[in-house]
Amino acid sequence: MSRTQPVPVLTIDGPSGSGKGTISRRVAEQLGWRLLDSGALYRAVGYAAGAEGLDLSDADAVTRCARTTKIRFQAAADGGDTRVIVNGHDATDELRTETAGAAASAIASIPSVRQALVDLQLGFRKAPGLVADGRDMGTVIFQDASFKVFLTASAAERAKRRYKQLKEKGLNVTLGALQREIEARDERDASRTVAPLRPAEDAVLVDSTGMPIDTVVAKVLAVVRP
Ligand SMILES: Nc1ncnc2c1ncn2[C@@H]1O[C@H](COP(=O)(O)OP(=O)(O)O)[C@@H](O)[C@H]1O
Ligand SMILES: Nc1ccn([C@H]2C[C@H](O)[C@@H](COP(=O)(O)OP(=O)(O)O)O2)c(=O)n1
């Protein structure tokens, strides 16, 4: 009897601003695979908890919020950024800020919050394949993935990229403050006890410092199609 092949998954984990979102989108397009932006789920829960006035360190309250928050991804009509709809409200713009990133990182350190989001993430694994972007895609959620990448870049370069990105979106940010916020978030994500940010043992490391986006895309595609 022949066994059904599992749906292939490419995991792309790494710190903030390493290019996970950009590269995942481009690679998923090229492969014709689905996309999971797991960070958006944590951002959405942090945002919903804030909107409800919850204390982000109240594990029970935030876990309830993670279980009940309705999160939907919707393709933008104009071909722009995918919209993230949280409890019926288009929260895409609010979710982009570093404040939302910090809230996401805070609630993401609560084990029961992470647990509440597991099935939702597993549900994205559908044919013909999935590109999953996050911190623990290769180490926890899709441990059995055939293709794993850990994407990095120097902290200085990641802060510059984020600065440029947020400025282009019209947000009022300073490079120094952003670099400090990003470093603090990476430290928290890497030092937490549950699903810390770290490369899976079988991940291919890609350091994109000074590397053009097209080259990074080609390197990551080569992991799937050598
Ligand atoms: N290799 C690269 N070189 C220059 N800029 C990049 C590169 N990869 C991504 N970027 C830019 O850096 C910013 C952050 O990338 P993003 O994909 O949002 O990172 P992450 O999802 O890891 O936080 C975006 O504006 C993106 O266009
Ligand atoms: N799989 C994931 C994805 C994100 N998180 C947490 C930790 C991150 O600091 C925040 C925000 O993640 P997101 O990928 O949106 O952030 P960046 O785009 O990399 O800045 O969520 C997580 O704990 N596990």
Image (cartoon, helix red, strand yellow):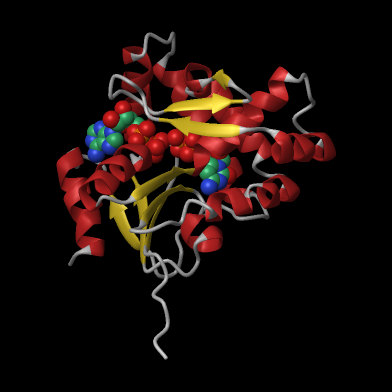
Residue in the picture at 66% in, 55% down: 194
Which one is nearer the viewer's eye here, 120 or 217? 120
x, y percentage for residue 211?
A: 19, 42
Q: In this view, does 102 lie to the left or right of 110?
A: left
x, y percentage for residue 12?
A: 39, 52
Residue 65 against residue 169 in the figure, above or below: below
> Is residue 124 something one can see in this rendering?
yes
Residue 223 against residue 131 in the figure, above or below: below
Q: From this viewpoint, which residue is outermost toward the front?
A: 1
Which one is nearer the viewer's eye here, 157 or 56? 56
Figure quadrant of the N terminus: bottom left
Q: Image quarter for residue 29?
A: top left
Figure quadrant of the C terminus: bottom left
Residue in the picture at 33% in, 45% down: 24
Residue in the picture at 44% in, 8% down: 172
x, y percentage for residue 152?
A: 35, 47
> How many labels, in total?
0
Q: Image quarter for residue 58?
A: top right
Residue in the picture at 63% in, 33% down: 70
Q: In this view, does 87 lie to the left or right of 5?
A: right
x, y percentage for residue 74?
A: 44, 29
Q: In this view, does 211 lie to the left or right of 139?
A: left
Quadrant observed for ligand 1 in the rendered image: top left
Q: From this viewpoint, which residue is outermost toward the bottom?
A: 1
